[in-house]
Image (cartoon, rainbow, N blue to C red):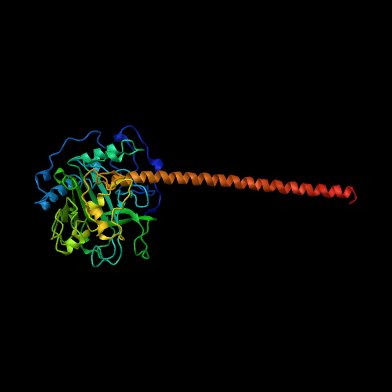
């Protein structure tokens, strides 16, 4: 079992002219010596021009009246060509997909096998009644060609990314695969599903909250959830985006694990009028659809809004992603100490391209764009601090040496003076 903690720093960024030639770091750490398994490579040959519009099968389906059919078409689009290349998305024979830069930085950064980043930890009992231990979860996100074009525009200058250019066109699709380290005996419906090895955190038995963010080792992870986000102008009256979530269920029929993904639901708005009081009065989300036949235990979001099994039950898919902005002013999830009225700010319908906070620049629901930009800034700050500490350490060493020399000189002078004084006194007969 390989274990290491090496990290690729700011110096790994080499910039050339144009987004198609920007070389961004791939992963948090390099493979250990002698590694002969898969190695993740960032798909970063972003289109220089907006690709021609594709004929997308879900565009003829009304997501409000046929949400299940809409989601099935989006999922088929995401899987097409990616299964054949085991999600090495730049090798997809149908269409290339792309990764957002700078998700490798920090303790939760991309691991070196599949580019997974650490997500929210699942607490005991959240995934299944059998789950007695916390479980760390890891994910990788991808964008289709229109989304990849926008990534390239945002990062055209790799040292000065511009979040204001994160304005995704109609037909953009983002997808995220989420894997869990939970064992099958803890979460039985994971059986028979797609599994990867990943370089993830080592969680000691004594760490009952899975807070460890230090040492990593190659360990098995299993598919738990798949999220999709579609820029669909038919949702412009609410958010401009349609979000959907699938969960893996090994008890469903299907020739492969990917066919056993069950839709949890779909949403195009946050139901701003759905409050605890109206919910207690019988109201339920209207700007979304929840599948009643998932077949696997689920926890939804706030007041029954859509969320996947990895996500916080205090938020929703759209409310979380609406906070994608630079700088990150408000947290993704409403703070627990706020009252209900204050928490409702997270469940307003923020339009595509509008910031959650007026003082920020929107990243248009793309958390990996806002996180990547802020990771770059944090990496710079860390490098400046390290450089300053090295300079101070060097100066301190020089000062100590100077002090040692000065002290030695004073001792020598005192000794020489005492000897001369004794000779003087002897010769003077004193």
Q: Position of residue 294 (x, y in %)?
A: 15, 60
In the image: residue 132, left or right of residue 192: right
Q: Position of residue 342 (x, y in %)?
A: 27, 57
Q: Residue at x 37, y 52 (%)?
A: 107
In the image: residue 150, left or right of residue 374: left
Numbered marks: total: 0
Q: Residue at x 33, y 43 (%)?
A: 373
- For the question of whether residue 243 can be seen, the reply is yes
Q: Position of residue 275 (x, y in %)?
A: 20, 59
Q: Residue at x 26, y 55 (%)?
A: 179
- For the question of whether residue 39 can be seen, the reply is no
Q: Residue at x 9, y 44 (%)?
A: 60
Snapshot quadrant of residue 158: top left
Q: Nearer the viewer, residue 215 or 400?
A: 400
Q: Nearer the viewer, residue 217 or 56?
A: 56
In the image: residue 289, left or right of residue 320: left
Quarter of the image that includes the N terminus? bottom left
Q: Position of residue 345 (x, y in %)?
A: 25, 53
Q: Is residue 310 above or below residue 101?
A: below
Residue furthest out toward the top: 17
């Amino acid at each position: 079992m390989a274990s290491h903690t090496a990290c690729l720093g700011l110096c790994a960024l080499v910039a050339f002219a144009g987004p198609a030639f920007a070389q961004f770091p791939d992963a948090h750490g390099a493979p250990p010596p002698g590694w002969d398994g898969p190695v993740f490579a960032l798909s970063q040959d972003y289109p220089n021009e907006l690709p021609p519009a594709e004929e997308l099968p879900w565009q003829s389906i009304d997501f409000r009246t046929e949400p299940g059919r809409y989601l099935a078409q989006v999922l088929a689009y995401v899987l097409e060509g990616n299964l054949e290349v085991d999600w090495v998305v730049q090798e997809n024979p149908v269409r290339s997909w792309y990764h957002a830069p700078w998700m490798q930085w920090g303790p939760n950064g991309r691991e070196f096998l599949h580019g997974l980043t650490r997500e929210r930890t699942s607490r005991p009992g959240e995934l299944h009644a059998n789950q007695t231990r916390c479980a760390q979860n890891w994910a990788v996100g991808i964008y289709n060609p229109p989304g990849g074009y926008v990534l390239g525009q945002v990062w055209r200058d790799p040292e000065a990314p511009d979040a204001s250019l994160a304005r995704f066109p109609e037909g953009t699709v983002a997808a995220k695969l989420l894997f869990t380290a939970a064992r099958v005996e803890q979460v039985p419906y994971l059986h028979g599903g797609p599994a990867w090895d990943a370089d993830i955190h080592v969680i000691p038995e004594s760490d009952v909250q899975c807070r460890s963010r230090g040492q990593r080792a190659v360990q098995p992870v299993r598919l738990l959830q798949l999220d999709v986000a579609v820029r669909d102008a038919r949702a412009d009256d609410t958010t401009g985006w349609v979000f959907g979530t699938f969960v893996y269920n090994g008890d469903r029929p299907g020739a492969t694990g990917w066919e056993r993904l069950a839709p949890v639901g779909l949403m195009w708005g946050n139901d701003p009028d759905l409050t605890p009081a109206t919910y207690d009065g019988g109201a339920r989300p209207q700007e979304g659809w929840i599948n009643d036949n998932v077949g696997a235990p689920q926890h939804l979001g706030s007041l029954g809004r859509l969320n996947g099994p990895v996500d916080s039950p205090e938020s929703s898919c759209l409310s979380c992603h609406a906070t994608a902005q630079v700088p990150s002013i408000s947290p993704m999830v409403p703070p627990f100490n706020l009252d209900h009225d204050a928490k409702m700010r997270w469940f307003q319908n923020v339009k595509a391209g509008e910031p959650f906070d007026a003082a920020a620049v929107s990243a248009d629901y793309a958390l990996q764009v806002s996180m990547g930009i802020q990771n770059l800034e944090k990496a710079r700050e860390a490098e400046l601090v390290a450089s300053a500490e090295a300079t101070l350490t060097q100066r301190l060493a020089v000062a100590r040496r100077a002090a040692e020399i000065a002290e030695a000189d004073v001792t020598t002078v005192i000794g020489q003076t005492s000897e001369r004084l004794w000779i003087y006194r002897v010769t003077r007969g004193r």
